[in-house]
């Protein structure tokens, strides 16, 4: 899939990964098109970064109006919890992943270097969104203890189980879309991070390269790590971020907020939802 490109008339991008015909919709915001002032200029969607809450709410209203469905913004903590949402769910629920079987509500994750991971089943019956930073991906809990599951593994388990129970049939395969994140040439990590991943699975070492300039530092390929974990879970229909510079939040200040680059920054977002059936039938 081609990297995100802002339309000349909008600050948003709606990628297509082949599930549009089933009513699965995705939406990515860029950093422009909102009302926030520097250094949060201008489509900052995060309430937790020091921006004027009123301006953030205006931005969220603009974002939701563009989607055309209720948008649930989570209170993300770099954990592994996932919640099921519905059209009446309020924003501010504490979790780093959300899913739904109901049409007309957008699962949404905010990021500024972490990856927004969007999921859908092949029949267009369930969608989900996951906030993927390195801590959540390796499953690092309080006091730096490794948990039995990562946020991706937990989301896959919960969504697969819910599909099987809700529709009373074998789970259909899942599709995954990897959004923009910090790229493999800019994501510096410590030896401890590498050790945490390789302790979980030695295969992850292939996603790290020793830093040429800084001793005891490594460069991490977050898109590669996510793909390795998804494939280990049996998810092979993977779209989006391929690790190239056009997807890198640090390298594209014109498109994305980046905490690593700017230290004080806003948050952009990726959403996924099921279009109401009547609306879909009218479009078809």
Image (spheres, grey):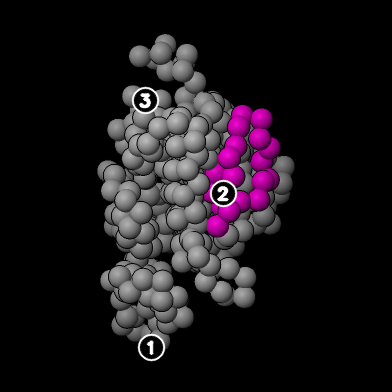
Count of marks overlaid on the render: 3
Do labels 3 and 2 touch, CB within 8 Å? no
Do labels 3 and 1 touch, CB within 8 Å? no
1 or 2: mark nearer the eye: 2
**Residue 82 circle label:** 2
Q: Which residue is mark 3?
A: 22
36 or 76, which lies in front? 76
Cα separation, mark 3 vs mark 1, equals 50 Å
3 or 1: mark nearer the eye: 3
**Labels 3 and 1: the sequence-earlier one:** 3
Q: Main secondary structure of the magenta part?
A: loop
- The reply to whether residue 62 is visible in this rendering is no
Cα separation, mark 3 vs mark 2, equals 24 Å
Which residue is located at x 56 percent, y 74 percent?
145
29 or 83, which lies in front? 83
**Labels 1 and 2: the sequence-earlier one:** 2
- Looking at the picture, how far across and down is residue 99, in whole percent? 52, 40
Q: Secondary structure at mark 3?
A: helix
Q: Which residue is mark 1?
A: 215
Q: Which residues are magenta?
A: 80-98
Q: Is residue 63 left or right of residue 159?
A: right
6 or 279, which lies in front? 279
- Looking at the picture, how far across and down is residue 52, in whole percent? 71, 49
């Amino acid at each position: 899939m081609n990297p995100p490109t802002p339309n000349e008339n909008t600050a948003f991008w709606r990628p297509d990964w082949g599930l549009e015909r089933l009513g699965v919709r995705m939406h990515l915001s860029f950093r422009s098109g909102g009302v926030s002032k520097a250094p949060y200029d201008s489509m900052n969607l995060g309430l937790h970064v020091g921006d004027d809450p009123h301006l953030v709410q205006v931005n969220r209203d603009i974002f939701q109006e563009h989607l055309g469905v209720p948008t649930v913004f989570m209170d993300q903590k770099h954990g592994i919890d996932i919640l099921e949402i519905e059209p009446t769910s309020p924003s501010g629920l504490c979790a780093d992943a959300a899913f739904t079987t109901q049409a007309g509500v957008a699962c949404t994750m905010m990021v500024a270097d972490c990856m927004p991971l969007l999921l859908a089943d092949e029949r267009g019956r369930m969608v989900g969104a996951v906030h993927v930073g390195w801590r959540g991906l390796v499953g690092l809990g309080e006091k730096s203890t490794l948990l039995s599951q990562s946020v991706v593994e937990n989301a896959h388990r919960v969504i697969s189980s819910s599909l099987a129970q809700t529709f009373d049939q074998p789970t259909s395969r899942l599709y995954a879309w990897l959004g923009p994140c910090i790229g493999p040439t800019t994501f510096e990590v410590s030896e401890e991070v590498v050790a945490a991943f390789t302790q979980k699975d030695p295969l992850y070492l292939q996603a790290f390269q020793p830093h040429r300039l800084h001793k005891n530092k490594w460069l991490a390929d977050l898109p590669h790590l996510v793909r390795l974990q998804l494939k280990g879970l049996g998810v092979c229909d993977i779209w989006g971020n391929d690790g190239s510079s056009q997807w890198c939040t640090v390298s594209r200040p014109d498109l994305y907020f980046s905490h690593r680059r700017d230290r004080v920054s806003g948050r952009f977002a990726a959403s996924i939802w099921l279009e109401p059936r009547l609306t879909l039938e009218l479009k078809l």
